[in-house]
Amino acid sequence: MRAILQRVSQASCTVNNNITGQISIGFLVLLGIEDADTTEDLQWLAQKIVGMRVFGDENGLMNKALAEVKGDILLISQFTLFANTKKGNRPSFLRAARPDKAIPLYEEMIQTLSELIGKPVATGIFGADMKIALVNDGPVTIVMDTKDRENH
């Protein structure tokens, strides 16, 4: 599982001119799911997202986590995070999970994040042509991959 985490002062997702999700302060999370991903990967990633201390404290240092700033999450499914660009100029997406595998994990991530932050998670629509608008605060952008985690 791969996630791009962007600290935002606002973000929204629009599908067919209708806003499907919007937040103010918090994280825009672009989530890529591959066939090898498990619920264990999902749990680890969800904990890392909500625990990430990248919000400013009283001294302007990145010391606070999402809950401490009462932040929100906008979660967007994005299979293109698993693009293979090694050959040619047209990316291959073979590593990205097919919808029958990805949708249940995406829905589980929505539920897990929602439980961890104690409020609903804003979302896009899986597989839709989405328009994402954001104000990246900082900018702060962090790339996380469950296959890169340390085992301790």
Image: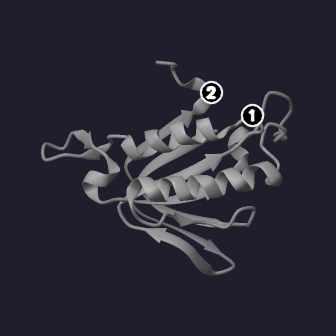
Give the alpha-carbon distance from disc 2 to disc 1, as whole Å. Answer: 10 Å
Image spot of residue 143 (x, y percent) = 53, 37
Q: Residue at x 61, y 81 (%)?
A: 18
Nearer the observer, 85 or 46:
46
Image spot of residue 50 (x, y percent) = 41, 47
The residue singled out by tag 2 in the image is 147
Secondary structure, mark 2, is helix
Secondary structure, mark 1, is loop
Nearer the observer, 60 or 152:
152
- Quarter holding the N terminus? top right
Image spot of residue 98 (x, y percent) = 82, 49
78 displayed left or right of 135: right
Q: Residue at x 70, y 37 (%)?
A: 37
Above/below status of 31 relative to 1: below
Q: Crowding at label 2, few (<14), some or many (≥20) Cα neighbours within 10 Å?
A: few
Which color mode does the image show?
Answer: one colour
Above/below status of 37 relative to 126: above
Mark on residue 36?
Answer: 1
Q: Residue at x 13, y 47 (%)?
A: 58
Image spot of residue 128 (x, y percent) = 73, 66
**For the residues bearing labels 2 and 1, Cβ distance under 8 angstroms:** yes
Q: Amino acid at mark 2?
A: Lys
